[in-house]
Image (spheres, grey):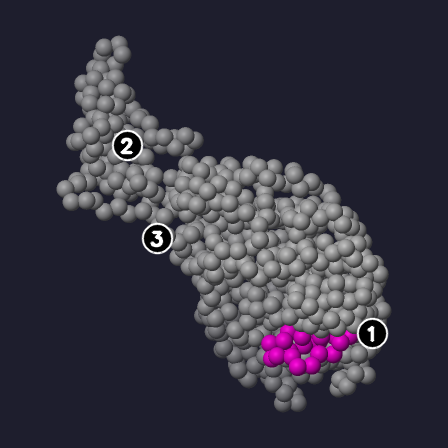
Amino acid sequence: MKKVIIAEKPSVAKNIADAFKIKTRRDGYFEGEEYLVTWAFGHLLQLYDAKDYDESMRSWRMEKFPFIPEDFKYKVKTDSHNRNVTDKGALKQINIIKGLIDRDDVDGIISATDFDREGQVISDELFIHFNEKKPIYRLLLNEWTPEEVKKGIEKIKPNTEMQNLQDAGIGRQLADWIIGINLTSVTTIKYKFNDDKILNIGRVLLPTLKIIYDRDKEIENFKATSYYKLNASFKTQNQEEYEGLYYENNSEKFEDKKYLDNISNIIKEEYAEIVSKETEKKNEYPPFLFNLSNLQGYVTSKYKGWTSDKVLKVAQSLYEKKFITYPRTGSIALEESLEGRARKVLETLKKGLPYENQVKFKKTKRVFDNSKVESHSAITPTYLKPSGLSKDEEIVYNAVKNRFIMQFMPIAQFEETKIVAKVFKEGVIGEFISKGKVQLVEGFRVVEKIETKDTILPMVNEKDKVLVIDSKSAKVTKKPPKKHTEKTLLRLMETCGKSFKEDNTEDSEEMMASILSGFSIGTPATRAETIKKLKDVGYIMSKGKSLTCTDLGKKVVEIFPVKELLDLEYTGRLEKTLSDIEKGKVKKEDFLKMIKEFTINGVNEIKNDTSALKYFKVDLKEGEESLGNCPECGNPIIEGDKGFGCSNWKNGCKFTIWKDDRYIASFGKKVSKEMVVLLLKNGKVGFRNLKSKKGTTFSAYFKLEKDAKTNYWNWKLEFI
């Protein structure tokens, strides 16, 4: 009897077939004595569109939302160019897979899709679609080298053990469908300020947009501040020159330039004495192994024209070619059980390197630490040495390879020196401080020839005299924060907007704990796709390596009323809940119940929103007269048969003053055109001879005030 192995892509199926030396290739699969190896093309199925459940949903009408099906169904995915047509290639492959499974000589199925949420769903949705009854097993691998494939097949487990992962994957699918379909539809209907453009709303899309919007606003509102500093140049007895910065009370910042100019004159061609010299040896460790976000950040910041999406595609290609391990990981360490494999990889890759004799395998907590691994270990090379790589593949492969090799090199060592010099003259209260580094051991830095801009200081000792050869004050203006790049954006998505103060945040334990908590925006696999989609839908654009909001992106953030979807904390909690479903801590059903309630409330909030009415500008038709501006949206108020209403009524502005208003009538008065003009111009209108319920007469102003809770405009009386 045989088993059907289903891989996620044809290239992976070929790797599996090669591992078992299966040479016979047929239409859509490989056939061996023990295994039939076939493949998907990613997702072969997709969730029904709204119109598949209800034909009337083809046209978007506000009253049809919220729309949440009782039972969600799958269909063969549609053609990428025409969504009304079934993808013929997908249908053909589904039939091939089904035909193989149904063969009489097949007694089981092995799912060999990627070991993550999406990979689990890619195969499971097929089994649900087939209503499959034959035994299903799961192959869980981090790389597709022949050795690992054979080991993995010996350790396959029943697919039923993957229920939590399936629940998380399908929970994510359904949540994004419910939120995306409903909120995208009602937002597009409600805010038609951009012609017929669809306004995409998503669980991950909006908070990512908000990060960029917030930075843009921070730059826009930045107020520059300036201060002055005093630099001096010194010459030692050995004729070596160096610089020092003037400090008073531990601060180098001064508001008065004249004060510094005076000190500059006092110390001219004077001698300063070295009053202290502190030297400290420090160790520098290599940066951690790459997870996907760090790899994307490294490559996009170092090479022009790279996007995080491109880095992922190239890394995926290297993974499918068996040259690196699974790239969609959030971990920066390896499982401790991988010690033997890592040793083998290192011994293979170090051969022929100019620094080969410095590369020595050792097991350290920086590299091997189960507590720093979530689902997948960090990205490393495999023991297969690549050949025939494209230039793009070389860039990503070398980054991964070098980062791996660095872990087994000597640590870099440098000497950090602080020199304090003082000019003993009246009027010179402070002292000049100079800081510099001297590298003692290059260590791992030799791997990438890391450039250093560190200041090298001359050899001086306490009590030495140094001559002031020049000094000048300079104005320093604090610069606004920089626009986000893909590197900084990925980091904030990974840690849900938390910023960390360490110089090298990649090596921060706090940072790693944040990443491993699952409290993030999206997953390593989806973040690049989110950034790309923000560009594609016109919410953000690139300026060199910088990212900035478009006018449309700004408008969406400013008008969208369901503020939870713009809140990083809320989105982080959703992602954390999906992570908890994977771990069996939360039920998929409870998560989806919460998502449905959130969506229903969100749809109603958008329907009742009036805050964006000001974005619509109405031009009056010929013959129509404006009586003033609408207090709700600023458009003209015009007279109708029964009242005076806003000309923006088609877009949802309901502001109206009725001619037969009962409240005004109760005082023995009528609403007139002249009254409305005065009310809109002055914010209130006065009346004399008003009749009270007791029959007395009085004078008062009437004005309209909006109730913040009900959004209704009510009359208020102000006695004259």
Q: In the visual, does 99 lie left or right of 146?
A: left
Secondary structure type for disc 3: loop
Q: Residue at x 74, y 47 (%)?
A: 133
Amino acid marked by disc 2: Thr
Q: Distance between the residues labelled 2 and 3?
A: 27 Å
Q: In the visual, does 7 lie left or right of 631?
A: right
Marks 1 and 2, the one that precedes in the sequence: 1
Residue 225 appears in the figure: no
Residue designated by label 1: 344
Marks 1 and 3, the one that precedes in the sequence: 3
Task: Give the extent of the magenta segment.
Answer: 380-408
In the foreground, 92 or 16:
92
Residue at the extreme top: 694
Residue designated by label 2: 656
Marks 2 and 3, the one that precedes in the sequence: 3
Amino acid marked by disc 3: Asp
Task: State which quarter of the image contains the C terminus.
Answer: top left
How far from the left and from the top, in percent, is residue 194? 36, 53
Front tag of 2 and 3: 3
Amino acid marked by disc 1: Lys
